[in-house]
Amino acid sequence: MTHAVMDGQPPVRHRSRRRGAERNPLVWCAVAAVMVFSLVPFYWLINTSLKTGADLSTASLFPPHPSFDNFTSVLGDSQFLRALANSGIVATVSTALALVVASFAAYPLARLKMRGKFLILSVVLSVTAFPGIAIAAPMFSLWNDLGLYNTLVGLIIPYLTFTLPLSIYTLVTFFKEIPVELEEAAYIDGATPFQAYYKVILPLAVPGIATVGILAFIFAWNEFLLAATLTYSPESRTVPVAIAFFSGSSEYEQPLGTISAASLIISIPLILLVLVFQKKIVSGLTSGAVKG
């Protein structure tokens, strides 16, 4: 065993191969192409949001007369601000519930030896295969009967239904990567199973929990179909639905500027979340990819 391996460093052969890939101009060209492909739509969104009036019909790379009127109009709309608050409440509550329930469900599935564990995980994951449109109409009728139609609770429940399966499956995989010897050491020190869970396992599972939380929050924040089906009043609409109801200043004017400004505004929370939890997300997504 080489000194590099004993120190926890990758072998010299692997390091030289990685350095060779980093110096390859084709790799950097590919990275640049991916960045351009990803950022051009976002730049065009900014470009359109800064245009008003006749400038919206031009395809110029830069706004001829940059203006923040679209942002002022959007932020001055009380219905949009209400929808923004609704989206924040629904996304935060559904994400929090998904993390709590998924962590308690995934931990025993990862640790306990039981028959049919693979079948249980398969059934749980199969729920995500159902398209939202398949349950929208039945849920509309059921929610009407239960009095949950046009309420935030009526959105949180179906969002939780769609985010839980993937959250459980992801956390099961992550909990399996945590050595069981850590729990056994906690038991020897006198910890109960629950104490070993939240004092030893949960802190080590933070990267996986952060990854699951971000994915659940993005789904709830961006979801449109169920939000449009299960709400009808501006007081209960979420942001994606509120943007769909934007109208221009006249009958024949398309509100491209205000829609772009609103889309840019609602993208900011997601961008900040990803930037803040970037390292946790990468660690969670790559967990278990390399053994040893």
Image (cartoon, helix red, strand yellow):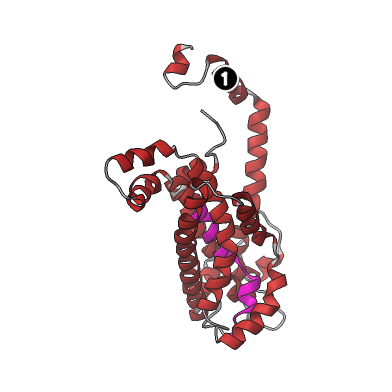
Determine which quarter of the picture holds residue 19: top right
Residue 219 is one of the magenta-drawn residues: yes
The amino acid on which the numbered mark 1 sits, given as a three-letter code, is His
Determine which quarter of the picture holds residue 51: bottom right
- Quick check: 215 left or right of 226? left
Vertical order, 167 against 37 (above or below): below
Q: Decide which of 186, 217 is in the foreground and name it.
A: 186
The residue shown at (71%, 71%) is 133
Q: Secondary structure at mark 1?
A: helix
Q: Decide which of 163, 55 is in the foreground and name it.
A: 163
Q: Decide which of 120, 218 is in the foreground and name it.
A: 120
Residue 108 position in % (x across, y down): 48, 51
Residue 50 position in % (x across, y down): 58, 63
Judged from this view, the residue extending furthest toward the left is 190
Residue 199 visible, this orientation: yes
Residue 280 position in % (x across, y down): 46, 45
Residue 226 position in % (x across, y down): 63, 73
- Quick check: 225 left or right of 215? right
Residue bounds of the magenta highlight = 212-232
The residue shown at (51%, 28%) is 292
Q: Main secondary structure of the magenta part?
A: helix
